[in-house]
Amino acid sequence: MADTQRTITELQALLADNQSAQISAQDLRDFLISARLNNITPVEAAVYELTADDINGGTVHLAYTTTGVVAVSWPTALLIDNKSVTIKDVDGNSSVNNITITPESGLIDGAANFLMAVDLSAYTIYCYDGNLHIK
């Protein structure tokens, strides 16, 4: 049987409390494969809305800045304290085609949005007290 990378949400459902001790050896292997790969989401689009899996310490791998600007939104429902995501400009052209990160509500370091404009940059953004902050 092949090992399968699972999302953080799938792993949390699978390993909830394990009171029944029904986790198979294959499920444990899948868990190790998934945890080792650290939830990287490749994005090749002008608009992207973060998911629950992204904000569980994942990385959004943005490969679009050679084509155009990118808008990333953080939904209000996912403004959960102690959750974070790293956003990376892998195309290396955000100085020309900026990446704008915008929370649907709240602020990001006191502003309505955050502009990534340094080629090949990466920023980790976390939530605390209903607002976003740049590490």
Image (cartoon, rainbow, N blue to C red):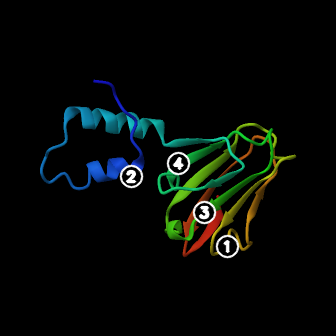
Residue tagged 4? 58
Element on which disc 1 rests: loop
Amino acid at circle 3: Trp
Residue tagged 3? 74
Is residue 3 found left or right of 109 in the rendered image?
left
Work out how far the residue at label 3 is from the one at label 4, CA to CA, in angstroms: 13 Å
Q: Nearer the viewer, mark 3 or mark 4?
A: 3
- Please report the residue visible at 77 percent of the width from the left and 42 percent of the height from the top: 65
| Residue 84 or residue 53, whichever sits in front | 53
Is residue 19 found left or right of 66 in the rendered image?
left
Earlier along the polypeptide chain: callout 1 or callout 2?
2
- Where residue 107 sits in the image (x, y, percent)? 67, 73
* Label number found at residue 107: 1
**Are the residues tagged 3 and 4 within 8 Å (C-beta)?**
no
Work out how far the residue at label 4 is from the one at label 1, CA to CA, in angstroms: 21 Å
* Label number found at residue 9: 2
Element on which disc 2 rests: helix
Earlier along the polypeptide chain: callout 4 or callout 2?
2
**Are the residues tagged 1 and 2 within 8 Å (C-beta)?**
no
The relative height of residue 3 versus residue 120 in the rendered view (above or below) is above
Disc tally is 4
Work out how far the residue at label 4 is from the one at label 2, CA to CA, in angstroms: 12 Å
- Please report the residue visible at 75 percent of the width from the left and 40 percent of the height from the top: 120
Mark 3, other Cα within 10 Å: few <14 / some 14–19 / many ≥20:
many
Q: Nearer the viewer, mark 3 or mark 1?
A: 3
* Label number found at residue 6: none
Work out how far the residue at label 1 is from the one at label 2, CA to CA, in angstroms: 26 Å
Query: Where does the N terminus fall, quadrant-wise?
Result: top left
Earlier along the polypeptide chain: callout 3 or callout 4?
4
Mark 2, other Cα within 10 Å: few <14 / some 14–19 / many ≥20:
few
Amino acid at circle 2: Thr
Mark 1, other Cα within 10 Å: few <14 / some 14–19 / many ≥20:
some
